[in-house]
Image: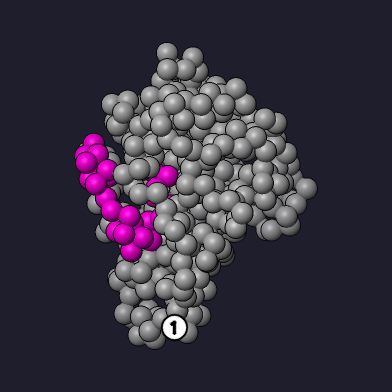
Amino acid sequence: MGEILGLGISHWPRLGQKNEQLSYWLRRTLQDPDIPAHLKDPKNWPPRMQEEWSDDEGLSHAQEHRDSMASGLREVRKALDAFKPDAIVVWGDDQYENFREDLIPAFSVLAYQDDLVCQPWGGTPNYWDETKETTFNVKSAPEISKYLATGMLEEEFDIAYAYRPLHFPHLPHAFMNTVLYLDYDRVGFPYPLIPFQVNCYGRYVISHKGFGFPYAEADKPLDPPSPSPKRCFDLGRAAARVLARSPWRIALVASSSWSHAFLSEKSKHLWPDVESDRNLYDAMVRGDTDVWRNTKLADIEFSGQHELLNWFCLVGAMTELKKKVLWSHFTETWVYNSDKVAAIFG
């Protein structure tokens, strides 16, 4: 029988950049002419947001936010190393990277047959001062990937699978950043990676290129929706059953931040929905999985919690295995686009 560890982290792109870039999305959003002017005035923001923004557009609090995230990543990495998995399965989203107009699967196991040679920076300044030539060799696990895809189909989840990348040369950022951040201290990353893509961006994946967009464009013609939180939860349960029957040690990882300010209709794209994030976090910690499974997609979309569907898969898997949160850390923010959670289940 297989052994399974549950983990959750964020793949927030700004963490890989310099501190000066951590408040990028809020600064960009404040240039949007269609957001009401009174809401763009810091005097009208929540007190915690005013404190983070300060008089330097968030720079003085950036290191504190980075340190909080890094401490969580290090705890998760310690748990991963102690577990010594044969592979890690990562639930992550695709933002118009590998999947585009010709194919948008609700779920897809990227059962790549070859190891990937990844150059993530392309000349972009980054926290580690790595160059565009810096290469990361990410191992694949073709036997385990095919076993997982087969098992999901036998569990009557009609998922897609792929043996090689489609539109993206290596790993989309949800998966690449998972490697970069779980190796935050650059000690090496020896574990094979199995990306399990979830169409978190749904209505926005083609219409808005799976990205932030001007406030006035929120109601432009949209795409079909994401799979529901309930469906993601149940998919996680099925994946847990499949892998529990395997002979391998597998780490199941949810990779995403929680509510995204630039997607939140509730806050007019200016700050995350901290209250809704806290409610789900508290339910996860106390093991109240009914709250998770009964969450509606409309509520997720209104709060900007689109990417949290990756965590619904993880919470479903842990529910199936009767595993609880052993350790968790909530990094709250009002200025740096999204709350971030790190968690270990066992």
Closer-to-camera residue (160/313): 160
Q: Is residue 309 magenta?
A: yes
Closer-to-camera residue (239/155): 155
Q: Amino acid at mark 1?
A: Asp
Prevailing secondary structure of the magenta residues:
helix
The quadrant of the image that shows the N terminus is top left
Query: What residue did someone put label 1 on?
Result: 34
x 51%, y 26%: residue: 150
x 42%, y 73%: residue: 219
Percent of width and height locating residue 40: 40, 80
x 51%, y 80%: residue: 31
Percent of width and height locating residue 157: 42, 35
Percent of width and height locating residue 55: 45, 75
Res. 114 image quadrant: top right
The quadrant of the image that shows the C terminus is top left
| Chosen colour scheme | one colour
Bounds of the magenta segment:
287-312
Q: Is residue 118 above or below residue 1?
A: below
Q: Is residue 330 left or right of residue 24?
A: left
Count every numbered label the image shows and give the total: 1
Closer-to-camera residue (55/155): 155
Viewer can see residue 16: no
